[in-house]
């Protein structure tokens, strides 16, 4: 059953890659990163980690792999990272937020809305952390000029 | 036309293509600065936001030159970003002359999307159906979500082609896709109406602007990051209101 999910995830991620016109040589790589992200997300959920933590972990791993592969095949990181994190997008939570507000259940809507925001934030956090590691030595925004 | 003008042209053309088709701001600035420096100009400064690029540099012994371009469209075509990246890398390494680079960049600017439109619609369907299944729908939800996602994708492409309205296209696409999803479930295809609707909306998710907004904010391009984030938020809001309209009408 899990294998079927992974195959469908692979196809759906490649579909997204085509929508965003990811170059042909990066399509399969992007799909593979998407599958890895999704399987890490599911495995973390299976071990009863919170959805937000699972999302952050999966997004971090996907971003790290995208950075490494992007250097290897010499293409911009975004072309790999975007398909990679697509399976983590909290689409269903966002939809249920909207649905609850439409039905007038504002408290439930807020609950879903906060979860959506947290999961989106977790994706961003994973991306940002990988980025911080990979821009070693050329980062900006230091608090003090230590090396002057 | 002096060398400065020609280099200015290719730098701004490269930047414009990258920014239009969804590159991050820092990549645009870095590419332009590297190209100008490789053409032996000094005092190179580039400032790019989501909607325009400023570039100034100085030719040794002559005056500063400064130009800007305005970028109105923001589309999604990561292939063009990759190709411009390639051209700039070759130019910086000295494998391309200014004229050759200009020809190549013009070719890239004119080139159509790398995949045929029918394949894009088909993959929108695959993506929609796949995510309807992955987000907790069952097998019966896969096919109706596939159909509805194709309708969403076709609507958003055709609407933008003929009317050129930015956020209304997403609104109409979300409305039509959501309506078809509800109708298909009503006529017995598919079991869970929510999952089918989610699947039908997935092709509209503003993935590129959202990721780029995070990236821009992190690299310190606060103006570009916030404006891109605002654009992604507006897109999401128009999707949400479109499908909310469909739900309140039909459900």
Image (cartoon, rainbow, N blue to C red):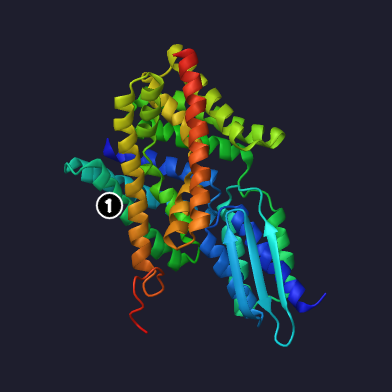
Residue B71 percent location from the top left of the image: 66, 53
Relative to residue B166, is residue B140 depicted above or below? above
Given residues A145 and B27, the one toward you in this image is A145
Residue at left offset 45%, top offset 63%? B220
Q: Inspect this view and state whether residue B148 appears.
A: no
Q: Position of residue A35 (x, y in %)?
A: 35, 47
Q: Residue at x 67, y 68 (%)?
A: B11
Chain letter, disc 1 residue: A
Q: Of residues A86 and B143, which is closer to you in this image?
A: A86
Horizontal placement of B161 versus A115: left or right?
right
Please tell me how crowded label 1 is: few (under 14), some (14-19), or many (20+) other residues with Cα within 10 Å: many
The residue that appears at 60% across and 58% down in the rendered structure is B18
Q: Is the N terminus of chain B in the top left, top right, bottom left or bottom right quadrant?
A: bottom right
Residue A72, given in percent of the width and then of the height, sits at 43, 67
- Observer-nearest of A146 and B244: A146
- Look at mark 1 in the image and give the residue it sits on: A57
Q: Quadrant of residue B29?
A: bottom right
Mark 1 element type: helix
Q: Is residue B152 above or below residue A81?
A: above
Looking at this rendering, what residue extends furthest in the right direction? Answer: B1
The mark total stands at 1
Residue A4 falls in which quadrant of the image?
A: top left
């Amino acid at each position: 059953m899990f294998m079927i999910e992974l195959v469908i995830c692979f196809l759906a991620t490649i579909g997204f890659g085509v929508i965003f016109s990811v170059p042909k040589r990066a399509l399969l790589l992007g799909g593979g990163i998407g599958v890895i992200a999704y399987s890490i997300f599911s495995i973390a959920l299976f071990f009863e980690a919170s959805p937000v933590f699972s999302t952050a972990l999966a997004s971090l791993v996907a971003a790290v792999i995208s950075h490494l592969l992007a250097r290897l095949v010499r293409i911009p990181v975004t072309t790999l990272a975007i398909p990679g994190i697509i399976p983590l997008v909290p689409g269903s939570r966002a939809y249920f937020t909207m649905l609850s507000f439409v039905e007038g259940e504002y408290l439930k809507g807020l609950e879903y809305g906060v979860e959506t925001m947290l999961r989106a934030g977790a994706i961003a956090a994973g991306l940002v952390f990988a980025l911080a590691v990979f821009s070693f030595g050329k980062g900006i925004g230091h608090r003090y000029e230590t090396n002057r | 036309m002096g060398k400065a003008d020609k280099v200015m042209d290719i730098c701004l053309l490269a930047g414009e293509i990258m920014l239009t088709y969804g590159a991050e701001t820092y990549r645009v600035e870095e590419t332009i600065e590297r190209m100008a420096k490789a053409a032996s100009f000094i005092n190179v400064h580039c400032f790019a936001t989501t909607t325009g690029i400023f570039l100034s540099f100085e030719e040794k012994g002559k005056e500063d030159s400064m130009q800007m371009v305005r970028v109105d469209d923001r589309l999604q075509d990561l292939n063009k970003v990759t190709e411009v990246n390639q051209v700039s890398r070759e130019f910086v390494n000295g494998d391309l002359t200014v004229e050759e680079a200009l020809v190549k960049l013009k070719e890239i600017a004119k080139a159509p999307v790398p995949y045929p439109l029918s394949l894009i619609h088909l993959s929108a369907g695959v993506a929609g159906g796949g995510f309807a299944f992955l987000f907790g729908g069952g097998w019966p939800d896969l096919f109706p979500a596939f159909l509805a996602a194709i309708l969403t994708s076709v609507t958003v492409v055709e609407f933008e082609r003929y009317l050129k309205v930015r956020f209304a296209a997403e609104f109409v696409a979300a409305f039509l896709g959501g309506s078809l999803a509800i109708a298909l479930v009503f006529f017995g295809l598919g079991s869970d109406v929510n999952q089918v609707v989610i699947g039908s909306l997935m092709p509209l998710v503003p993935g590129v602007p959202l990721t780029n907004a995070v990236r821009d904010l992190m690299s310190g391009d606060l103006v570009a990051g916030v404006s891109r984030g605002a654009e992604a938020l507006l897109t999401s809001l128009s999707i949400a209101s479109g499908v909310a309209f469909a739900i309140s009408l039909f459900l």
